[in-house]
Amino acid sequence: MIAALFPGQGSQTVGMAKAFYDQNEVARAVLDEAETAFPGLLELMWQGPADALQQTAHQQPALVAAAIAALAAYRDGGGTEPDYAAGHSLGEFSAYVAAGSLGVGSAVRLVHNRGRYMQDAVPEGHGAMAAVLKTDTEHVARVCTETDGVVEIANLNAPGQTVISGETAAVAAAGERLRLEKARVVPLKVSAPFHCSLMAPAAARLEPDLANTTFAAPAFPIVGNVTADVVTEDKIRDRLVEQVTEPVRWSESVLKLYDLGVRRFVEFGSGRVLSGLVKRILSDVSDYDIITVTDPESLQEAL
C-alpha cells in the first residue's frame, strides 16, 4: 500500500513548482487555482524574495499549492493512487485536498489565514522554538515540565529528534539544561512558537473559518497529527483546530501508516524533509521504500 506525505513549514524554496507549471497542464491548473485564491502567490513562490516567502502567512499556502501540483502531475502520469495520506502540520491540509475532502482554493485561503493567526498570536520576539537531538522524548518532556514559564513539546519528528516551543526565556532555559544533560539543542529560525499553548488565540480564530468550510468525505483515510490515527469524517474540523496548539506526532503517524500496511511512502511538494524523517523512524525495518516528487525529473522515478 501507498501513503502520500505532505511537508510543512521549512520546506519552501524560491522556484518551487515552477517546472511543473511549465511542463504539466494539470499541475498548471492547480497552481492557477491557488493563484486565484491568493493573488500574487505564484510570484512569491517563483521570484521570492526568500524572506517574503518564509513569512508564515505566505509559505503555508505556497507549500499547499506546490504539494498538490506535484500530486496532480503524479496522477496525470498514471501514478498509483494513495491508500492513505498524512501531512506534517500544515501539510495535513494538503492531505485533505489530496483525498478530495477540500478544494485547492479553500485550502489556500484557510492556511493563509491560519498563518496570519499564528503569527499574530504572540508578539515578535516573545516566542521561540528549538530542536532537541540525541536524547529521548521522555527526557525532553521532563525538562519542559520542570522549567518555569511556557515551554512544551511541539513536534515528535523522529527518534532522537524533538522540537520544543514556547516563551523565549523558557525555551532558552530548557535548552540550556538539556545541553548540560548531554542533548544537542539547535534554535530554530521561526517567526512564532508553533504547536504550543501560546497558539490558543490562533486556534480560536481558525475555528469559525473551519466551521464555515465544507469538507467532503475523504476518498482515502488521513492519519492526523493530533492523535497519530485515522481521522473520522466527523472529527476533521476539531482535529485541525486542535492541531494548532497540540504537538505534531509525526513519528507515531509514520509508524501507524506502517502498521496499516503501507510499504511505499511518496513525499509530494518541496524538499525532502519528510523522506529523511521516515528513514529515521523506520530504521529498524527494510521492507519499504520512500520517494519524493518535487519536480518533473523526480516524478519519473515515482511512476
Image (tube, rainbow, N blue to C red):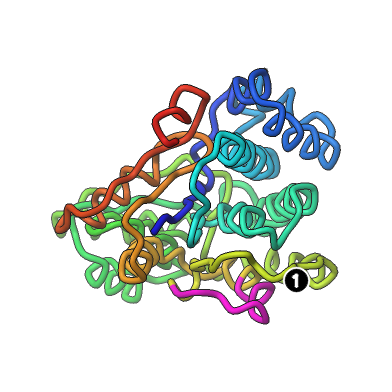
Q: Is residue 16 left or right of residue 247?
A: right
Q: Position of residue 132 (x, y in %)?
A: 29, 54
Name the one closer to the observer, 296 or 93.
296
Residue 231 belongs to magenta span: yes
> Which quadrant of the figure has residue 39?
top right
* Residue 180 makes an appearance in the image: no
Kindly identify the residue that appears in the image at 70 percent across and 33 percent down.
26
Residue toward you, 96 or 203: 96
Q: Quadrant of residue 31?
A: top right
x and y, in percent, of residue 207 in the image? 75, 71
Quarter holding the C terminus is top left
Residue at the far front: name it. 78
Q: Residue 280: image x %, image y %?
A: 24, 51
Which residue shows up at 61% across the image and 52% down it? 94
**Secondary structure at numbered mark 1:** helix
Residue 293 in picture, x, y percent from top left: 47, 35
Quadrant of the image for the N terminus?
Answer: bottom left
Tell me if residue 145 is in the magenta stretch.
no
Label 1 environment density (alpha carbons within 10 Å; few <14, some 14–19, many ≥20): some
> Can residue 73 be seen at all in this image of the molecule?
yes
**From the viewer's perspective, is 214 left or right of 154?**
right
Say which residue appears at 47% left-offset and 51% top-offset: 5
Q: Is residue 253 above or below residue 6?
A: below
> Image check: 260 left or right of 92?
left
Task: Inspect the image, locate mark 1, and give the three-letter code of the amino acid beneath it.
Answer: Glu
142 in relation to 289, above or below: below
Prevailing secondary structure class for the magenta stretch in the rendered image:
helix
Q: Nearer the viewer, residue 212 or 163?
A: 212
For the magenta stretch, what is the residue range? 229-239
Disc 1: which residue: 207
Q: Is residue 120 left or right of residue 9?
A: right
